Image (cartoon, rainbow, N blue to C red):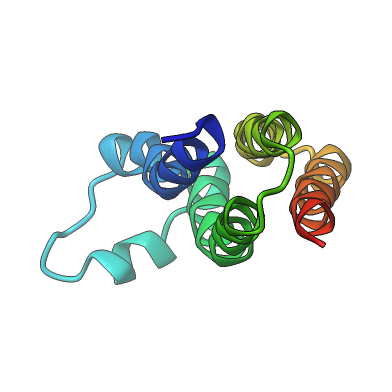
Amino acid sequence: MSFALWMVLAAILLPYLAVMPAKVTSRIDNHAPRLGMERMTGWQQRLDWAHRNHFETFPAFAAAVIIAQMRGAPQGWADILAGLFVLIRLAYTAAYAADRPSLRSNLWSLGFLCVLGLFALAA
């Protein structure tokens, strides 16, 4: 399996890694966990929002990697863009937790450019 495809697995794990610190440090009632998440504030709430955003960005990233692989895109470039996407998304999570909205938005944009780059490689 290529490095780019391994990055799809990493991207699958990102939402859970993002929200784990918030869930571990809060007292969420497991009977209604979504209500507990809605009551979070501060960095815990921001990690929940990052968690949700990871789910939103995953389909486009996974599709881009899979299509690049299917179309025989240059593997080295696909690996670089996929790896950058995951690293950028990790930095995005840190920026979200640290309440750095401008940095977070810039990182989101860079991640989106990686996705567009993967589609361009497949063209």
Q: Is residue 27 above or below residue 38?
A: above
Position of the N terminus, as image quadrant, is top left
Position of the C terminus, as image quadrant, is bottom right
What residue appears at the point 31 percent right and 69 percent down from the top-left corner?
34
What residue appears at the point 55 percent right and 40 percent down from the top-left corner?
43
Query: Residue farthest to the front?
Result: 72
Q: Nearer the viewer, residue 77 or 114?
A: 77
Count of residue discs: 0
Image quadrant where residue 85 sits: top right
Q: Is residue 116 above or below residue 25?
A: below
**Picture coordinates of residue 61, whole percent (x, y):** 62, 56
Q: Is residue 46 left or right of residue 27?
A: right
Q: Nearer the viewer, residue 87 or 100?
A: 87
Q: Nearer the viewer, residue 86 or 15?
A: 86
Q: Is residue 12 above or below residue 80?
A: below
**Picture coordinates of residue 30, whole percent (x, y):** 13, 60
**Picture coordinates of residue 75, whole percent (x, y):** 67, 35
What residue appears at the point 84 percent right and 43 percent down from the top-left corner?
110
Q: Nearer the viewer, residue 75 or 3?
A: 75
Q: Is residue 83 left or right of residue 30?
A: right
**Picture coordinates of residue 114, whole percent (x, y):** 78, 46
What residue appears at the point 83 percent right and 50 percent down from the top-left corner?
117
Q: Is residue 69 left or right of residue 77?
A: left
